[in-house]
Image (cartoon, rainbow, N blue to C red):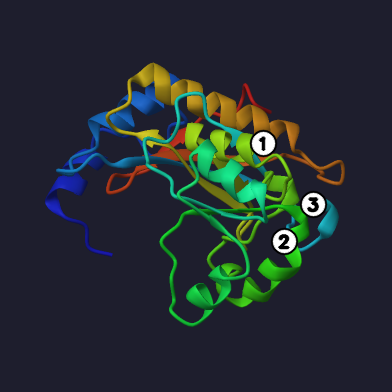
Amino acid sequence: MKRGKKYTEAAKLIDRTMQYEVEEAVSLVKKASTAKFDETVEAHIRLGVDGRHADQQIRGAVVLPNGTGKQVRVLVFAKGEKVDEALAAGADYAGGEELIPKIQNEGWLDFDVVVATPDMMGVVGRLGRVLGPKGLMPNPKAGTVTMDVTKAVNDIKAGKIEYRLDKANIVHVPVGKVSFTDEQLVENIETLMAAITKAKPAAAKGQYYRSVSISSTMGPGVKVSTAKYA
């Protein structure tokens, strides 16, 4: 894959054979960020588990102390006063069955996270084919199926992110923006790593953290030492 001049220059700052302490890795990612927009900083965590087995699945959510720097649009499926409660908490959209055709037939997807009260999951289940592939299906493990819609909306708006394994057993998540201070990014990464360490399945054998790297949207990846998380 041919890389642009800026990327090539930025990559020279980083020793690909090195695993850096998280503070140094963050500093390098920021230095190597050359785009004209405020790039997202992402963490890529390869785990020594096999997600094809139910007892080795890793999925959950964590509130990043400094948020993600992104405005997150929240849709809440609820009934009655729970709709008003969701809107009062700051949900961008809230409603019930009437939203189904809008999503199914009109392709409306102007939201980033979907929350549902348990009594609405039968209705939301009909959207599985649309929401599932986009990773938008509400899930109890991620705290997005709950009667406490106020807490769910507040947490998401405050910087709650979901993490889960992809098919290659890697977790990819945003941990902030290049415009964040080093301290804010480090704190977010440490909070994420603590959550994933805690989520280690009992069935996981051998080395849990295979590799961890962070990168900006357009920048090269920087390997992070896993010694202190192991």
Disc 1 to disc 2, C-alpha distance: 29 Å
SS label for mark 1: helix
Residue 107 coordinates in the image, percent (x, y): 44, 76
Residue 1 coordinates in the image, percent (x, y): 28, 65
Q: Of the residues shown, which amino acid type is indicated by label 1?
A: Ile
Outermost residue, top direction? 183
* Residue 93 marker: none
Label 1 vs 3, first from the N-terminus = 3
Q: Residues within 10 Å of mark 2 (few under 14, many from 20)?
A: some
| Circle 1 or circle 2, nearest the eye | 2
Relative to 197, residue 119 above or below: below
Q: Which residue is mark 2?
A: 120
SS label for mark 2: helix
Relative to 184, residue 32 above or below: below
Q: Nearer the viewer, residue 214 or 162?
A: 162
Q: Of the residues shown, which amino acid type is indicated by label 2?
A: Met
Relative to 208, residue 127 above or below: below
Relative to residue 107, is residue 36 drawn left or right? Answer: left
* Residue 196 marker: 1
Relative to residue 181, is residue 3 drawn left or right? Answer: left
Q: Marks 3 and 1: in contact by CB < 8 Å? A: no
Q: Nearer the viewer, residue 44 or 161?
A: 161
Label 1 vs 2, first from the N-terminus = 2
Disc 1 to disc 3, C-alpha distance: 13 Å
Q: Nearer the viewer, residue 201 or 106?
A: 106
* Residue 56 marker: 3
